[in-house]
Image (cartoon, rainbow, N blue to C red):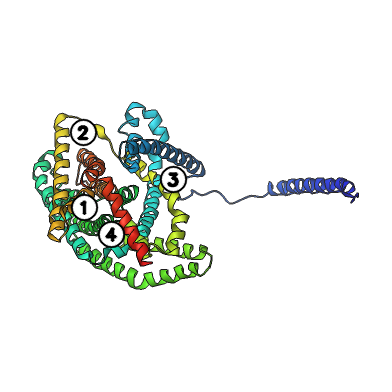
Amino acid sequence: MDTGTSGTTPRIFVVYTVMLLGAVGLFLVFRAFGETLVAPPATTPVAVGATAGDTSSILWHLLLALVAVVALGRLLGTLFHAIGQPPVIGEVVAGILLGPSLLGRIAPDVAAYVLPGTVAPYLGLLAQLAVIVYMFTVGLELNTDLLRGQMRPAVATSHSSILVPFTMGAALAIYLYPRFATSAVPFTHFALFLGVAMSITAFPVLARILSDRKMTRTRLGALALTCAAVDDITAWCLLAFVVGVVHDSGGHAALAAVWTIGFIVVMFTVVRPILDRLSRQIEAGSSPEGPIVITLVGMLLAALATDAIGVHAIFGAFMLGAVIRHDSALARALKRAVGDLVIILLLPAFFAYTGMRTEIGLVSSLYDWLVCGLIVLVATAGKFGGTVIAARATGLDARHAAGLGVLMNTRGLMQLIVLDVGLDLGVISPTLFTMLVLMAVVTTVMTTPLLQLVFPESLQIAGATAVAAHEASTR
C-alpha cells in the first residue's frame, strides 16, 4: 500500500533547501552588519597556560608516549615473565630504555619526539593519578583478617627495617660525602637523605610482585604489605623531618605523624561503617553505580587528606581500599570497574616518567660502578638484615623471616620519589642520583629469584590454598 512517502520527499527536500539557504543568507546579513562595528583595542593577555596549538601538540606527544611505553612494557613484561621475573620489572626497564639512558643516546631525535621534555609534567600527573588508583585496588585485595594479632610484630619489623639501613646509610655517607657532594651541602643534610634513601621499601612494586605471584592473600603476603605500609608511612614522616631540617623547620615530622595516626583512626571508625552500608545496598539488589561513584570520590578525598598531611596521596587511597572488606560486593564491583584499565594502560606511565629522569651515562668510570655496587650491597644488607632480625625476635620462623626480608628489600617507586626530593633540594648530585636509581632497580630485580629460593612456588601455592580453605570454612 502506498503511504504517500514518495510524494512527501520533494517537499522535505524543498523545506531543507530553504532552511539551508535561509541560514546562509542570514549569516551573510549578520556578517555585513558586523563588519561595520568597531571593537575595543586589544590588550596583552595574561598567560594562563598552554595555547590551543601547544595543548594539541602536548596531547599528541602524551598519547604517543603512552603507546610507546605500554607496548614496550608489555613486550618486555612478557619476556621477563618468561625468565621468572614479574612483568612489572619489564615496565620499569621499558621506562628507562625510552629515556636518555638508551633511546636518548642512540637516537636522540626519536627520543625527543616520543618523550619530549615538554610532556614530562603532564605525563607525571597522569602517572601519579594512575598509581593512586592502583594502590586503591591493592588495598581492596588486602585481607585484614589475616593481620589479627600481627600488627605489633609488623610495626616492630618495619621500624627495624628502617633503623638498620638508615644507620648504615649514614655511615656510608662518611665515604660518599667528600666524593659526591659539594661544600654547599652540609654533611648532616647529606647523611640524613642517604639514610632515608636506604630505608625505603617500594610499596606499589612490592604489592605488584605479590599480586603477580598470587601471594597477596597469604600470611607472608599480608604481613609484607602491612610492614611495607607501616614502613613507608614512617619513612615519609622521616623524610618530612629531613626536609624540615634542610629548611630549618624540624617540627613538621612530629605533626605529620600525629595527623597520620588520626587519619587511620577515622578511616576505621567512621569511614568503614559507611562503606559497609554501601556494600549492603549492592547485596540487596541496588545498582552498584552510586556506591562506586561515592567510593571513588572518597578515594580522591582520602588521597587529598594524606597529601595535605605530608605523607603521600597513595597512602590515603590505599587506606580507603584497605578498610573495604576484601570479599564484599562493593570490593568486587570496584575491581571490575577500575582494575584492568589502571594496571594495563595507565600504570606504565609512571615508569616512563621516572625513566625520563634517569641517565645511566653519568656513571661512566670503573670507580663509579664499584661505588654503585657498594651502595647496592649496603642497602641490601641493611634492609634484609634489619627485617630478619626483628622478624625472628617477634616469633616468625626462619623461612618466613627470610622471605619477609627479601620482600622488604624491594625498592622502586617510593625510592625514586625520595631521590627526586633530594635532587630538587640539591642535597644529592645527579651522579649519585643515578647510582641510587640503579640500586633501586637492582634490588627490585633481586626480589623474585631470592623469593623463589627462600619460598619455592610449591610453598606459595600451598599458602594461598590454605587461605582459600580457611575462608571457605568460615563462610
| Residue tagged 4 | 311
Which residue is the site of mark 3? 345
- In the picture of the structure, the residue carrying the numbered disc 1 is 404
Secondary element at tag 1 = helix
Residue 191: x %, y % from top left = 13, 49
Q: Is residue 302 left or right of residue 438?
A: right
Badge 2 or badge 3: first in the primary sequence? 3
Query: In the shown orientation, is residue 456 left or right of residue 292?
Result: left
Which residue corresponds to mark 2?
Answer: 363
Quarter of the image holding residue 335? bottom left
Please state the horizontal and vertical placement of residue 333, each as a whole percent of the image: 47, 60
**SS class of the residue under badge 4?**
loop
How far is disc 3 from disc 1 in space, using C-alphas?
A: 30 Å
Q: Choose between 128 and 402: the one closer to the eye.
A: 402
> In this view of the protein, which residue sits in the foreground, 340 or 217?
217
Looking at the image, is mark 3 or mark 1 nearer the viewer? 1
User: Quick check: 164 above or below 51?
Assistant: below
Instruction: Name which quarter of the figure residue 219 lies in.
Output: bottom left
Verify CB contact (< 8 Å) between mark 3 and mark 4: no
CA gap between label 4 and label 2 equals 31 Å
The image quadrant where one finds the C terminus is bottom left
Looking at the image, residue 75 lies above or below residue 281: above
The residue that appears at 34% across and 47% down in the rendered structure is 212
Of the residues shown, which amino acid type is indicated by label 1?
Answer: Leu
Indicate which disc residue 355 carries: none
**Which residue corresponds to the image point at 38% horizontal and 65% vertical from the top-left?**
325
Question: Mark 2 or 1 closer to N-term?
Answer: 2
